[in-house]
Amino acid sequence: MALKPPITELPIRTADKGFYKGFSVDVTVVGKVIIGLLVIWAVAFPDHAAEVLKGFNAYILSNFASWYVFVMASFVVVCIILALWPAAGRLKMGLPDDEPEFSNFSWFSMMFGAGIGVGMLTWAVAEPIYHFNNNPDVIQGFADSGSENNILNAYKWSFLHWGFSAWSSYAICGLALGYFAYRRSLPLTIRSSLVPIFGSKLSGPVGHLIDIVAVVATILGVAQTLGFGVNQFVDGMSRIGVGDWLTVEDGSPSSAGIIFALVVIMGASTLSALSGVGKGIKWLSNLNMGLSIFLLSFFLLFGSTWFGLWALVVGMWEYVIALPAMMVTVYQGGDEVAEKLVGWQGSWTVFYWAWWVAFAPFVGLFLARISKGRTIREFVLGAVFVPAIMCFVWFTWAGGTAIDLELSGVAQGAINEATDGGKIFAMTDIILGSGILGWLMAVIIVILLMTYLVTSADSAVLIVNTINAAGDEGPKARPHIIFWGVALGAVVAALLLIGGIDAIQTAMVIGALPFSVVMVLMCVSLIKAIYNDSRREAAGIPSVETPAE
C-alpha cells in the first residue's frame, strides 16, 4: 500500500455563539451531566449510592484486576521499545527545528510537581510504613511483619506503585498528545492521539465519546488526589490547633472538617483558574517547589540519613530485579493465603493502576504542553526515569525515617497508629518535639499541601476546559471555570460524606476503566504513527505540518 502524508486536519464542531461559544457542546454538556448526576445521586440517595458503588468495585476487582495489571505492564514495555527504537532519537514532538521551551531542570521540576506532588506528602511516609507491616511477602510467610527482614520488601512494593509503571502511563498519554498536536497541528485533545486508527471519524461521535471518557476520568482521578489531600489538610489544621470540630473520635475528618477544607481549597483553586497562568500561579508553583526542597532537605539532614541512603540504593536494586515478575503477577483466590493476596492486590496495586490511568489525561496533557521540541527518546527517558527516582528519594528518606523510628522503638507506635495523612505530622513531632518547632513544621507542611492542592485543582479545571473546547488553550468564560471548580469540589464532598475515601476510590476505579481502553489504543496509535513517519522520511514524504499563523 502506497504511503500518503498523514492527516493534519481534524475539524471539531464548536459553538460559534451563546453560552457554549468556543466549546464542543457534545462533549461539554454530556460531561457536565454525568458528573452532575453522580453528585446528585450521592447526595440524594447516599445509602443506595454507597451500596451500588461497592458492588461495582467488587465486580471490577473480580473481573478486571488482571486487565489493569497487564495494561500497566504493557505501558512499561512500550516505553522501553520507544526509548530503544532508532527513529525515536530523530523524531521530535514538534517540527524538526523546534527546540525545548524549558531547561532540563525546569522541565523535571514541573513534571514532578504535576504528577505526584500531593501524593508525596501522604504516601511517602504512610505507604512504606504500611508495607513494612504487611505485604505479599509477609502474607506468604517470606518475611516478618515489622522486622528488619521486611524493610526492603516495603520499598520493593512501594516503588512498584510509584515507579516506572506510574510514569510510563503518564509518558504514553503525554507523548500521544504532544506528538500529534505539535508534529501534525492537530487539536491538543485526547481524540487527536487516535487519528492513525480512526482517522477523520474522530470529528464525530467516536471522538466526542473519547473526550467525554477523558473528562470523566480526569475529574474522578483528581477527586481521588483531592480526597487524600482533604484528609491530610484536616489532620494538619487539627495539629496546628484550629479546632477539635475538624475531626471525629477516630481521627478521621468530620463532615464540617471536610466542607471547611473543600471551601478553602476549591475557593482558592477556582480563583487561581480564573486568573489563568499569570503571576499568582507562577508564584504559587515556585513556592511549593521551594517548600518541597526544604522539607526533603529536613529529612535528609535530621531524619535517618544513612538508613535512607541504604534503603534508596539497595531498595532500587531489589525493585529493578523484581519488577518483571511483580508487574505481571495476578493473584488468584483459593485458600486463606490466596484470598489475602487477592485482597491486598485489589486494595493497593489495582487501586494505584486505576488512579494513574484516571490521572493520565491531566498529567499527560500537561507533559505535552511543556515538552514541545524534545525527541521521543528524550521525552520517554526524562518523563519515566527522573520523576520515578525523585519518588524513590522521597520514599526512602521520609518513609525510611518513619520505619527507623518505629523499628528502633523511639516512635513507640505513634506513627503506625496515626491516620494516613497524620503520619507525617506524627513523625515530625517525634523529631522536633510537640512544642513550637513541631508546630512550625506542621504549619510549613500544611502550606505546602495547600499549594499542591490548589495548583492541582486549578490545573484540572483548566485542562478539562481545554478538552471541552476541542483543544483550544485560550482563556475560557468564567461560568465554565466556576462550574468545574464547584463540580470537582462537590464530587469530593459528596463521595467523602457517603463513604469516606473508599467511596472516591471506588468511583475512580470505575471511571478509569473506559479510559484504560483509550490508553491501550494510544500505544497502538503511537507505534503505527512513528513507524509510518520513519518510512515517510525515508521516502521523502512530509510527516509534519507547520501550524498556520
Image: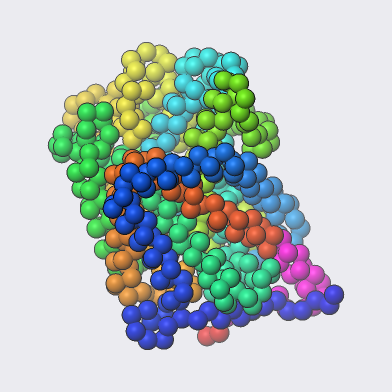
Residue 227 visible in image? no
Closer-to-camera residue (132/444): 132
Q: Is residue 533 covered in magenta?
A: yes
Residue range (magenta) = 527-547
**Residue at the right extreme, as displayed:** 1
Rendered view: 276 above or below 433: below
Q: Is residue 73 covered in magenta?
A: no
Closer-to-camera residue (337/123): 337
Closer-to-camera residue (547/176): 176
* Total numbered circles: 0
Looking at the rendered image, the quarter that the N terminus falls into is bottom right
| Identity of the residue drawn at 43% across and 41% down | 54
| Identity of the residue drawn at 60% across and 49% down | 168
Q: Quadrant of residue 426?
A: top left
**Residue 62: x %, y % from top left:** 57, 38
**Residue 223: x %, y % from top left:** 38, 51
| Identity of the residue drawn at 45% across and 59% down | 216
Residue 353 visible in image? yes
- Is 217 on the left-hand or right-hand side of 175? left
- Is 95 on the left-hand or right-hand side of 285? right
Rendered view: 209 above or below 359: below
| Colour treatment of the image | rainbow
**Residue 526: x %, y % from top left:** 67, 62
Q: Quadrant of residue 160?
A: top right
Rendered view: 278 above or below 419: below
| Identity of the residue drawn at 37% across and 23% down | 416
| Dominant secondary-structure state across the stretch colored magenta | helix
**Residue 498: x %, y % from top left:** 31, 44
